Image (cartoon, rainbow, N blue to C red):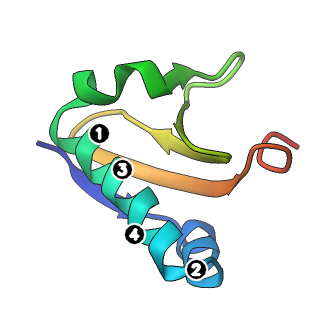
């Protein structure tokens, strides 16, 4: 199991969204940290970047899965996160 660290921008995005959605997103991130194979169909490597993205409905979570810490870098909607 990996430990999860959230960036300032990710925490800010979670604070702005409804509590039930924030709970759903953090739950999926925790599930990935415990068992990456369980979320394999929702995770892809980003082209031209060392990061991965986790899909949670219309929301995307950009993460860095290097080493023992899973770093959550950004959280945003599908249309806005890749700009």
Residue 66 as seen in the image, left or right of residue 11: left
Q: If you read the primary sequence from the N terminus, does the residue marked by circle 4 or circle 2 appear first?
A: 2
Q: Work out which residue is located at the far left of the displayed protein and give it.
A: 1
Q: Residues within 10 Å of mark 4 (few under 14, many from 20)?
A: few
Q: Indicate the secondary structure of the residue bearing disc 3.
A: helix
Residues at marks 1 and 3 touching, judged by CB atoms closer than 8 Å: yes
Q: If you read the primary sequence from the N terminus, does the residue marked by circle 1 or circle 4 appear first?
A: 4
Measured along the vertical axis of the image, is residue 47 above or below residue 55?
Answer: above
Measured along the vertical axis of the image, is residue 14 above or below residue 35?
Answer: below
Report the residue at 64% width, 23% height from top: 46
Q: Residues within 10 Å of mark 3 (few under 14, many from 20)?
A: many
Of marks 1 and 4, the one in the foreground: 4
- Residue 62 position, x and y percent, is 57, 43
- Residue 74 position, x and y percent, is 62, 55
- Residue 57 position, x and y percent, is 59, 44
Label 1 sits on residue: 32
- Residue 12 position, x and y percent, is 61, 79
Q: Looking at the rendering, which quadrant does residue 6 occupy?
A: bottom left
Q: If you read the primary sequence from the N terminus, does the residue marked by circle 2 or circle 3 appear first?
A: 2
**Which quadrant of the rendered structure holds the C terminus?**
top right
Label 2 sits on residue: 18
Q: How far apart are the alpha carbons under marks 3 and 4?
A: 10 Å
Of marks 2 and 3, the one in the foreground: 2
Label 4 sits on residue: 23
Q: How far apart are the alpha carbons under marks 4 and 2?
A: 9 Å
Q: How far apart are the alpha carbons under marks 2 and 1?
A: 22 Å
Measured along the vertical axis of the image, is residue 52 above or below residue 41?
Answer: below
Q: Residues within 10 Å of mark 1 (few under 14, many from 20)?
A: many
Report the residue at 41% width, 51% height from top: 71
Tag shown at residue 29: 3
Of marks 3 and 4, the one in the foreground: 4
Question: Which of these two is toward me, 66 or 53?
Answer: 53
């Amino acid at each position: 199991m990996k430990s999860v660290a959230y960036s300032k921008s990710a925490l800010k995005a979670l604070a702005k969204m409804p509590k039930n959605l924030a709970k759903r997103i953090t739950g999926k991130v925790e599930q990935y940290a415990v068992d990456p194979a369980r979320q394999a169909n929702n995770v892809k490597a980003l082209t031209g970047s060392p990061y991965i993205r986790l899909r949670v409905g219309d929301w995307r979570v950009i993460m860095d899965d290097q080493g023992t810490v899973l770093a959550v870098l950004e959280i945003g909607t599908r249309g806005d996160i890749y700009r």
